[in-house]
Image (spheres, rainbow, N blue to C red):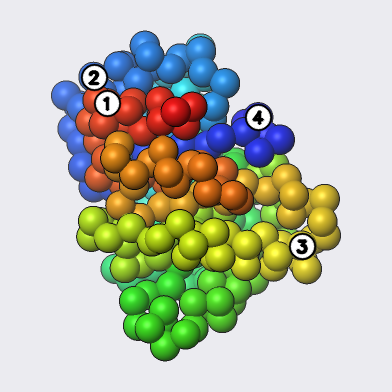
Amino acid sequence: MSNARNKFIAGNWKMNGTLSSLSEIEVIKSLFGETTYDIVILPPATLLAEASKIVAGSKIKIGAQNCHQNISGAHTGEISVLMLKDIGINIVLLGHSERRTESMENNQLINLKAETSHNCKLTTIICVGETELERKNGNTKKTIEYQLLNSLPKTFTEDNTIIAYEPVWAIGTGKTATAEEIHTAHAILRNQIKKLKGTAVASKLRILYGGSVNKENSSEIFQIQGVDGALVGGASLLSADFSSIIKSISR
Ligand code: PEP
């Protein structure tokens, strides 16, 4: 992955998409195959191998939405990083709030998964974000600092990791954080990285915003200082919407 805070846009399809949805990836490839941005599509596991073939030779990357912390063994239903690498996948999303809640993934497990991924040379997108209650109680800073500190493994570098700030209350709800809330949260996270790894790493690390990003609000979000791109859920499913979001980087 290129860095120097190159803009990074990821589309998380979640549990959506069948073989016919691969045509959306074909369109994104035809429009942005030579892009200078980092564009990653994260389809469900069933589509990873085919999607990976479609984007081969272009600048578009395909990522997985999860991996196991072990590289092989008796873990029924799981997918290892070696299996991902086998089909050309070098990026994995970890710590998404839906996995934290629905699959009870905690920071310690996310940390293990990230370490295994880094050891096998995968790039990780690690998500953190406060719930509505945590924000209401004034605990946003404490929550995201704690998640970051505990989810990041020792193997973390500015090149192998991208952080996604995703306030839980903004995911899939149509509620977007304000520019000030996004700016403040990103500054908290960058400062935490500075304390952990120093100024040089903190200044190079990319931090994305995620939470109801769409073609109407993306341009404003991309202009917020400290925002290096977006993790997009619902609005990444259709290439028409996702391409408008990508194009809005330069608006
Ligand atoms: C996400 O899946 O990470 C996400 C932010 O979803 P949405 O854009 O639909 O809110």
Q: Are marks 3 and 1 in contact (CB under 8 Å)?
A: no
Q: Earlier in the sequence, mark 1 or mark 2?
A: 2
Which amino acid lies under the numbered mark 4 shown in the image of this protein?
Ser
> Would you say 238 lies left or right of 242 here?
left
Give residue 155's position: percent from left, percent from top: 72, 55
Q: Quadrant of residue 133?
A: bottom left
Residue sitting at x 76%, y 62%: 194
**Residue beneath disc 2:** 23
Q: CA distance from mark 4 to mark 2?
A: 26 Å
> How far apart are the two marked residues, 3 and 2, measured between alpha carbons?
41 Å
Report which residue position mark 3 lands on: 194
Q: Which residue is mark 1?
A: 239
Q: Which residue is mark 4?
A: 2
Circle 3/circle 2 CB separation < 8 Å: no
C-alpha distance separating marks 4 and 3: 21 Å
Element assignment for label 2: helix
Which kind of residue does numbered mark 2 sit on? Ser
**187 to 8, vertically: above or below:** below
Residue 215 vertical placement versus 125 (above, below): above
